[in-house]
Amino acid sequence: MQSRPTLEDVARHAGVSRALVSIVMRDAPGASEETRARVRRAADDIGYRPDPRARRLRQLRTKLLGVTFAAGQEFHAELIDGVYAAADDFGYEVVLSGVTPHHDERRAVRALVDDRCEAVVLIGPDLPTAELEALAATTPVVVVARKVRGVDAVRSDDTAGAAMAVDHLYGLGHRRITYLDGGRAPGAAERRRGYTRAMRAAGLHAEVRPGGLTEREGATAAAALLAAGQPLPSAVFAFNDRCALGVLDVLVRARIAVPDQVSVMGFDDSPLASLAHIDLSTIRQEIPQLAHAAVSRLVSRLDNDDGDAQPTDIVVPPTLVARGTTAVPA
């Protein structure tokens, strides 16, 4: 008995991807009229007919929102809590899929789709833009903490936040402010840009040094500053709070007084930043607003006939939080 033609057979016959065939068969946005015609001709040629039982199954709502996140990232954990709260408001449940060295981002996304999540929140994804666009063509997606062409995004104004940090330090009287960079991390380019622009606007020399996302990387960067054999900057602005904590640890161990000798500033306003023995000055990302905006955008696509709307880039202003690690330079 000859097997029934599948979507893969249609894709092979039409010379397109299976995902594109799925878009055409569901009459979903994301394919040109020429492509739709080619796919339908291929389906007719091989005798493909959609399975009505599968269609009815797909039409059953799961009310599940998937979330990918990097295990070990405190900022991601806080965002997840905000997503849970927002999902409750809209009557959705949340399914998590972590990204680890043994469970990469593609597998994390695939697991959520296989679990029949109706939409997916991607927190700080590293996937290439083309892959994110392809995913968004078949599943409602919102990216948090990164701007992506052709995909809904929700992010803090990282450029403004970095400039806010420089302005705060400049206002205290600092003139040599070193920035510890975040490399290729989501938001890193924007924070670097905000720092350099604000420094130039103030007539100061921008000093960008390798930093990172973790305490260990912050400690390595601080140790490099100490080993350089040059006068220390009066202030260090780190890519995030975790990096700043590594800087603080090295400075304290080296008996360099903070903020009397060196002021230190972070970014995120993580829970550790407000502890009395740390008291880190930082830039707060408004996590409840970010999470609510992300979930609201997905629900609009799912529930409010907004599926064909153009992608939006929602930018949430951050907030300066001045604490005990920044002060007037000695």
Image: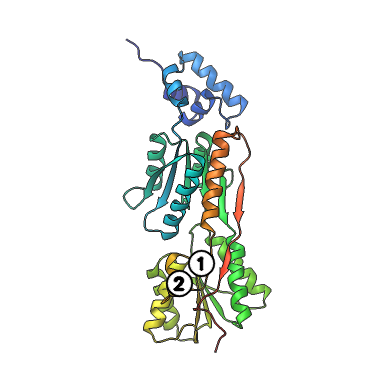
User: Of residues 205 and 279, which is closer to you in this image?
Assistant: 279
Q: Quadrant of the C terminus?
A: bottom right
Which residue occupies 40% across, 39% down? 112
Q: Secondary structure at mark 2?
A: helix
Q: What percent of the width, then of the height, locates residue 250?
A: 39, 79
User: Of residues 152 and 303, which is closer to you in this image?
Assistant: 303
Of label 2 and label 1, which has the lower sequence position? Answer: 2
Identify the amino acid type marked 1.
Phe
User: Of residues 233 and 52, which is closer to you in this image?
Assistant: 52
On screen, residue 109 above or below 278: above
Classify 10 Å Cα crowding around label 1: few (below 14), some (14-19), many (20 and above).
many
For residue 193, which numbered disc appears in the image?
A: none
- On the picture, is 46 further left or further right than 198? left
Color theme of the render: rainbow
Q: Quadrant of the N terminus?
A: top left
Q: Residue furthest bottom?
A: 330
Which residue occupies 52% across, 48% down? 143
- On the picture, is 199 further left or further right than 5? right
On screen, residue 303 above or below 68: above
Classify 10 Å Cα crowding around label 2: few (below 14), some (14-19), many (20 and above).
many
Q: Secondary structure at mark 1?
A: loop
Identify the amino acid type marked 2.
Ala
Q: What percent of the width, then of the height, locates residue 74?
A: 41, 60
For residue 244, which numbered disc appears in the image?
A: 2
Q: What percent of the width, then of the height, locates residue 292?
A: 54, 49
Q: What percent of the width, then of the height, locates residue 70?
A: 40, 53
Q: How many marks?
A: 2
On screen, residue 49 above or below 214: above
Instruction: Check disc 1 and report the residue beneath it.
Output: 267
